[in-house]
Image: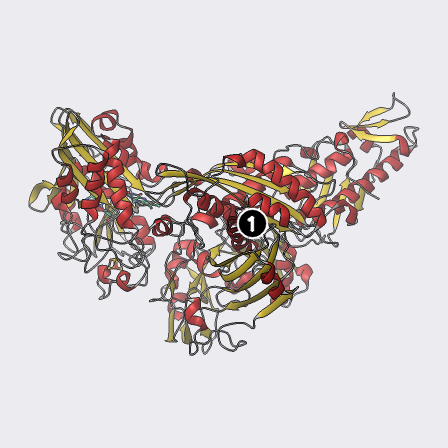
Amino acid sequence: MASWGRPEDSRLIGKRVQRLSGADKVTGKAKYTFDINRPGMLYGHILRSPVAHATITHIDLSEAESLPGVKAAIPLIEPGKRVRFEGQEIAAVAAITDDIAREALRFIQFDYDELDYVVEMEDAKEAGAPQIRDDWKGNQSETQVDERGDIEAGFAEAAVEVEATYHTPVQTHVCLETHGHVAEWEGDNLTVWASTQAVFGTRQNLAQHFELPENQVRVITEHMGGGFGSKFGPGVEGVAAAKLARQAGAPVKLMLTRKDEHLASGNRPSMTQKVRAGAAQDGRFVAYDMSGYGTGGIGSGADFTGPYVYHVPNYRTEKSAVAINAGSARAMRAPGHPQGAFAMDSLMDELAEQLGMDPLEFRRINSDSDPRRNKIRQAEYTLGAQEIGWHRRNRVSGSGTGPKKRGIGMGCGLWGGGGWAGTQARVTIHPSGVVEAVTGTQDIGTGIRTVIAIIVAEELGLRPEDITVKIGDTAPGLSAYGSGGSQTIGSVAPVIKTAAMAAKRKLFGHIAPLVEADPGNLRAVGGRIRSESDLRMSIPWKEATGYLGMETISEGGEWDENLRVGDTAGVQFAEVEVDTETGLVKVIKIVAIQDCGLVVNRLTTESQINGAVIMGLGYALLEERIMDDQTGKMINANLGDYKVPGAMDIPEIKSIAYDTDRKITGIGEPPTIPTAGAIANAVYNAIGVRIRELPITPDKVLNALG
Amino acid sequence: MENFAYVNAAEVEQVPSLLGDDWNETKIIAGGTDLLGELKEYIETPKKVVNLKSIPGLNEIKADAAGLTIGALVTLSDIAAHPTIQHHYTVLAEAAESVASPQIRNAGTLGGNLCQRPRCWYYRSPDIICLKKGGDTCYAVEGLNKYHAIFGGGPVYIVHPSDTAPALIALGATVKIVGPNGERAMPLEDFFVLPDVNPQRENVLEPNEVLTEVHVPQPKAGTKSTYLKVRERASFDFALSSVAAHFEMNGGTCSKASIVLGGVAPIPWRSKEAEAALNGKRITDAVAKQAGEAAVANAEPMTDNGYKVPLTRNIISRATMSLA
Ligand SMILES: Cc1cc2nc3c(=O)[nH]c(=O)nc-3n(C[C@@H](O)[C@@H](O)[C@H](O)COP(=O)(O)OP(=O)(O)OC[C@H]3O[C@@H](n4cnc5c(N)ncnc54)[C@H](O)[C@@H]3O)c2cc1C
Ligand code: SF4
């Protein structure tokens, strides 16, 4: 049975290792899809619906096609079909420059019959609202009911009750690199550089679409500028790029604009939930009755978590989704969790206050039904309370003096992230000493490339930079999952580890007779191969691999379940300062403690936590898709009016990558879950007025303060 | 954006004839930080763009006993970093520093800042033709008006986005304008026009006129000033509300107050009420409060921007106390 060994024996695992691609990224050498330029390449753009709901009656591409410089034009919807949101694709063009392609969109003639639209959830639920989905009756999905225990008995036992309604907005992914592809045909072979979280998924999708065998499609993602769940397939734009390229007989780069990105490449659904909950005098959380819904635009799902993290024996929940004429939701960093966590952690504080109990104490009593997570969580509570200085919290919320009031709050999250069986990988040792690790995963910015190098280097006694990591390419045919669900490291690392072990075993077996040693006594350390039993036997790595002569060692690996673990617990604490005269909330500090199982690279793990906290902070204080009822449009589809945090908005973040095991787990998503709840609770602690709707902007704070 | 001819102006006198007399035909470009956004979004589709940066001498700051003369092409970063401005015209340095982000301040000019177009999200949406763009509806009235005007609105309800304008008005600045018939000068306060005068423009400029220079008289000894701006996002954002305060002081007494507000009206909004509450008064908490209250007594909030009333009241008081 493979294991990651003891901490004291690890040279690299758990240490801080610079990202292998770091220098390339900061010097601009790293080529993202946006940077790929092919000989004779054209530029593509997509014409999108300017209205929220209409039947397309006619599309005429001829005028656009005849514009000098335009090389291809294709429709993306058939006349007679409906467009159901502003931004839905109508047609695409490719031209010799980006500007000509954009300009050509204005020469596409299209007619449509406008239909009534609805962009507010409450209006969409009304009888007689315009029907958005053909597969639903009305605009609300069937209600999912979940029940446990005896809710009435629970409320009968309750000494205090809270009734509240919580809202979260639609958040868009705002990937720094927008969605896009460069597509190039060579006969019936298609090569696509894609900004994707899934090279193999994209290959499969394109192969199906163009009815090609999969080995005639190659997808490459060398570097990638963020996906957060929105980039698992080629999408309409990827297929359009390939179609345009085929029509034009030239490579086509088609990258979405920022506006396209906001309108049509996914989002986190909103949530509105009404909850009634009760706690017993001794602090037990005994009853939870929640009904809620959210909108995923024209998409079908808008699920969110609840009850969440904390144990409640009696509950009843009703959840549904409401369709509106807006771009569809997609998976977004911990789908469903940040919504649910904000509501749950707000509720926990409200209940604790009714009981006159410290909210941390209340959480301790009701913490997590999963025993592994509970143990970790209790330790995280203690550590986090110390780090933030929980004792400084206002005993009576809002009791601080002066116009600027400080407050402290907390929130929790949980996640899976243990990975899956099925990743294919090889570790190859060449006679020259070169070591290659190859697999079909992709580095979406999380640092998996460096993690792979660390694991192989640790096993072979080399440095991470000695390992050539080849990922983000379907050509070697070693398939891997899309990078989602925080499952990447848990899926990839065990296979890489066992492949490296197998390659090392083979190398030792090969050279042992030549150096007159027992293979079981050989060790790979410090760039050398040594014998445990014969201290004189110590040769440099390259001399050892030289003994391979013409032979190359290349070994696959197995997904060893014992090398990974799922079900992680995270806790965050926030300190804020609320300016009661301006309504501004300034976050002073976030302490983010994330159960990480075994930390492989502490540096990039902390980066993940930092990034997730910043995203959570944007969700708490700034971000919101705003739909205009009068026009059916998203009125803030840019980065001026859709506000993401910038450097000056980011507080001190104490990211604690908390080693809880010698097994690996993924944490790309979980640290974004608790942030908004922690900030909202801190705001309450500061001002003594509860804001139950995100984002917590100055207008809401001032209105609440009255 | 649509194709256009690009013309480098060689001297100021040439600009009016290069511009011609149709707003839709020709646009001036200075730093381009506002204009390029409009062109890319097809908000403006001029046939010709006249570059001012090719004109020598418009990017100088002169500070002497008569005051401050700032060319239209001086960048916001140069203003924010200028020691004399920081020291004697503090409100202007602080206002310039509060604009946007460092990159935009490095490119954006003072002339462009004063002449920039509104940020109303309906105006900035390419396919919404509102009153300001020659349509017949102001969508903000029935729509999403969180960022709109609480003073001076109607028939359009934009807020003037400039941060330097309130500061310069508080300082009593005048502007120089060159047109086909030569030069004219006027107080900056008179440069801006309310929408009931002209819903489609924000100032008195004719299509063939260019703003060339801003002059600020030397403040009297003992003057104090400050700019206080509240924005949702700290890193870069327009004002939800801002106040430029400039006080001539006589000991602890304010002999003459200038209070000009940003982000709350279609033009930089001088609050005569706040000034009256301050003039001749010793600055105390109570007086500062009264000034704030007086300023917002006649505010006319819309559905989503009522918060701007307490916000504006509070920052006037806070700015006042910071100068006490
Ligand atoms: C992301 C972002 C954030 C911003 N934040 C702020 C902010 O917080 N506060 C703020 O005040 N501004 C802000 N701005 C607006 C910013 O564009 C201006 O502050 C800048 O000063 C404009 O100067 P410019 O030289 O780039 O103008 P340009 O873009 O060149 O011109 C702006 C307009 O003025 C006209 N014009 C320019 N010069 C003259 C002249 N001399 N005579 C007559 N007309 C002229 C042009 O025709 C054009 O219509 C922001 C802009 C962006 C893009
Ligand atoms: S406020 Fe002005 S710019 Fe905005 S919608 Fe009304 S008329 Fe148009």
Against A403, residue A311 (above or below) is below
Is residue A246 among the parts visible in the rendering?
A: no
Q: What x and y, as percent, mark residue A100?
A: 39, 57
- Where residue B199 sits in the image (x, y, percent)? 18, 58
Looking at the rendering, in which quadrant would you find the N terminus of chain A? top right
Report ligand 1 position as a quadrant.
top left
Q: Which residue is mark 1?
A: A673
Left or right of B109 in this view: A380: right
- Can you tell which quarter of the image residue A649 is in? top left
User: What percent of the width, then of the height, locates residue A201?
Assistant: 64, 59
Amino acid type of the residue tagged 1 in the rendering: Ile
Vertical arrangement, residue A351 with respect to residue A133, above or below? above
A90 or B224: nearer the viewer: B224
Can residue A247 be spotted in the picture? Answer: yes
- Which element is circle 1 on? loop
Which residue: 76% across, 45% down?
A563
For the view shown, which residue lies furthest in the left direction? B181
Count all numbered tags in the image, as a single digit.
1
* Left or right relative to A413: residue B218: left
Residue A539 lies in quadrant = top right
Density class for disc 1 (Cα within 10 Å; few <14, some 14-19, many ≥20) is many
Q: Nearer the viewer, residue B59 or A212?
A: B59
- Out of A366 and B257, give the one closest to the viewer: A366
Subunit under mark 1: A
Quadrant of the rendered image containing residue A533 = top right
